[in-house]
Amino acid sequence: MQIKSFDDLKTAGLAQPTPQRLLLVLLRAEAEADADAGLGSGNDVVRGSGTLTPVMATDIELTPDTRLDVIAEEADSLGHPWDLVLVSSLSSRSGGLATSEEAAPYLQQMAEAVIQGEDLSRYAVFDRAGSPVRLAVTGAASDG
């Protein structure tokens, strides 16, 4: 199945044989200070000349009622501006729903991957409307 929206991701997750916990890292996209002045800051980030900063990480049980707009509303109520959401999922080795405690180290890895400028292609990334976003690492990220 090709993921063309957050809802497609939800459908794929719900089709899994074991319950899924969604891992969500909310990201703020910021334009580089030296980007072309002729482009709006939003365009700079979309074209890859910006940086991503994790602003919040959380996990939730994936259910048929899971909706990105509700997640966005809850995140917005906490006062952390964000532009994109980095998403992964986790199932328990026992076949049941993974716990938040089991999810915590994976959320940390996701946030660290953003901070370190690592390749994020193993994660799904969506904008606030639930449309997929493709990220490309540019610039000099340290390998060690």
Image (cartoon, helix red, strand yellow):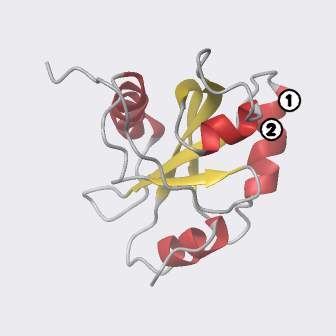
Q: Residue at x 58, y 61 (%)?
A: 62
Q: Is residue 27 above or below residue 87?
A: above
Q: Are marks 1 and 2 in contact (CB under 8 Å)?
A: yes
Q: How far across and down, in percent of the image, does residue 71 sit?
A: 74, 47
Where is mark 1, residue-wise?
77
Q: Is residue 1 above or below residue 29?
A: below
Q: Residue at x 52, y 74 (%)?
A: 3
Secondary structure of residue under mark 1: helix
Q: Residue furthest bottom?
A: 1
Q: Nearer the viewer, residue 44 or 80?
A: 44
Going by the numbered disc 2, the residue's amino acid type is Glu
Q: Is residue 24 left or right of residue 122?
A: right
Q: Is residue 38 left or right of residue 120?
A: right
Q: Nearer the viewer, residue 103 or 123?
A: 123
Task: Indicate the quadrant where residue 47 lies.
Answer: top right
Rate crowding at label 2 as few (under 14), some (14 to 19) or many (20 or more) other CA atoms within 10 Å. few
Q: How far across and down, in percent of the image, does residue 27 sit?
A: 60, 33
Q: Is residue 5 left or right of residue 41?
A: left
Going by the numbered disc 1, the residue's amino acid type is Ser
Q: Is residue 82 above or below residue 96?
A: above
Q: Residue at x 74, y 49 (%)?
A: 128
Q: How far across and down, in percent of the image, does residue 70 sit?
A: 81, 51
Q: CA distance from mark 1 to mark 2?
A: 5 Å
Q: Residue furthest left?
A: 144
Task: Indicate the quadrant where residue 83 lies.
Answer: top right
Task: Indicate the quadrant where residue 38 lies.
Answer: top right
Secondary structure of residue under mark 2: helix
Where is mark 2, residue-wise?
74
Q: Residue at x 65, y 27 (%)?
A: 36
Quadrant position of the N terminus in the picture: bottom left
Which disc, if any, is residue 122? none
| Count of number-bearing discs | 2
